[in-house]
């Protein structure tokens, strides 16, 4: 988390409920609304966290010594209205409100479902490019194909897996026919219609 902060990468994660910290500043004001949708805000503070540093003693045994991390983080503690469970969130984003941070963490499941869809349904198993533009192009192309498959599925009133398989076969046949025509051949000889 300290490396993320040093590289200006924002994050929101869940923390253990018994995490040791030193509170530097509280962001809760007297007139602030503590109801943030499905939860109640209990704490919103700027904190320094403790981390465990491995130390070898003279006998060769390892133990942990607690040290304060230099970078400050934001600790948000909310209590769910449904089950009275407390959730601890850590972030390095001091600009968003506590409500926005709690909602962003709740939306993580949508992101996980999206990546599962990309990996399992669209067979995106690895990235072809590792730069930002290459990843964006690959994601846009994948999403365009997904939309075309869904349109094909709806137009033909068939299941998703069948639509995906038939769409791939038809696109392949169309590409082959275009190549045959471009080379001066007759696609009717290749495809029996």
Image (cartoon, grey):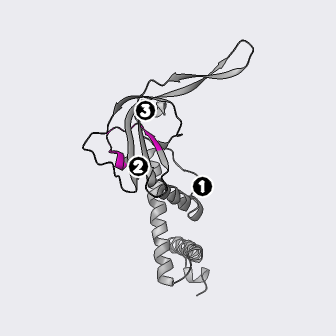
**67 horizontally vs 35: left or right:** right
Q: Position of residue 179 (x, y in %)?
A: 53, 70
What residue range appears in magenta? Answer: 88-100
Task: Say what secondary structure mark 3 lies in.
Answer: helix
The answer for how far apart the CA atoms under marks 2 and 3 are is 19 Å
The answer for how far apart the CA atoms under marks 2 and 1 are is 30 Å
Is-magenta flag for residue 91?
Answer: yes
Residue 125 disc label: 1
Within 10 angstroms of label 2, few (less than 14), some, or many (20 or more) residues? many
At a point 69% along the width and 22% down the height, the residue shown is 62
At a point 34% along the width and 37% down the height, the residue shown is 94
Q: Which one is earlier in the sequence, the residue at label 2 or at label 1?
A: 2
Q: Which one is earlier in the sequence, the residue at label 2 or at label 3?
A: 3
The answer for how far apart the CA atoms under marks 1 and 3 are is 29 Å
Q: Which one is earlier in the sequence, the residue at label 1 or at label 3?
A: 3
- Per the image, the residue denoted by label 3 is 5
Q: Position of residue 68 (x, y in %)?
A: 49, 23
Q: Position of residue 49 (x, y in %)?
A: 48, 29
From the viewer's perspective, is the residue at label 2 or at label 1 nearer?
Answer: 2
- Per the image, the residue denoted by label 2 is 102
Q: Position of residue 89 (x, y in %)?
A: 45, 42
**91 horizontally vs 25: left or right:** right
Against 119, residue 177 (above or below) is below
Of 178 and 97, the residue lying toward us: 97
Against 101, residue 110 (above or below) is below
Give residue 169's quadrant in the image: bottom right
């Amino acid at each position: 988390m300290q490396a993320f902060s040093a590289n200006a990468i924002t994050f929101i994660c869940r923390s253990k409920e018994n995490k040791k910290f030193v509170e530097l500043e509280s962001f809760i004001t007297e007139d602030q609304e503590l109801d943030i949708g499905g939860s109640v805000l209990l704490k919103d503070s700027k904190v320094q966290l403790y981390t465990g540093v491995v130390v070898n003693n003279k006998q060769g045994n390892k133990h942990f010594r607690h040290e304060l991390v230099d970078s400050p983080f934001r600790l948000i503690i909310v209590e769910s209205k449904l089950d009275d469970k407390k959730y601890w969130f850590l972030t390095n984003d001091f600009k968003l409100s506590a409500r926005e941070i709690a909602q962003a963490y709740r939306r993580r499941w949508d992101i996980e479902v999206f990546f599962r869809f990309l990996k399992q349904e669209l067979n995106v198993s690895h990235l072809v490019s590792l730069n930002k533009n290459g990843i964006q192009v690959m994601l846009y192309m994948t999403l365009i194909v997904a939309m075309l498959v869904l349109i094909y599925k709806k137009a033909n009133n068939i299941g998703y897996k069948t639509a995906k398989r038939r769409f791939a076969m038809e696109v392949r046949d169309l590409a082959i026919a275009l190549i045959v025509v471009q080379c001066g051949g007759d696609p009717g000889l290749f495809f029996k219609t």
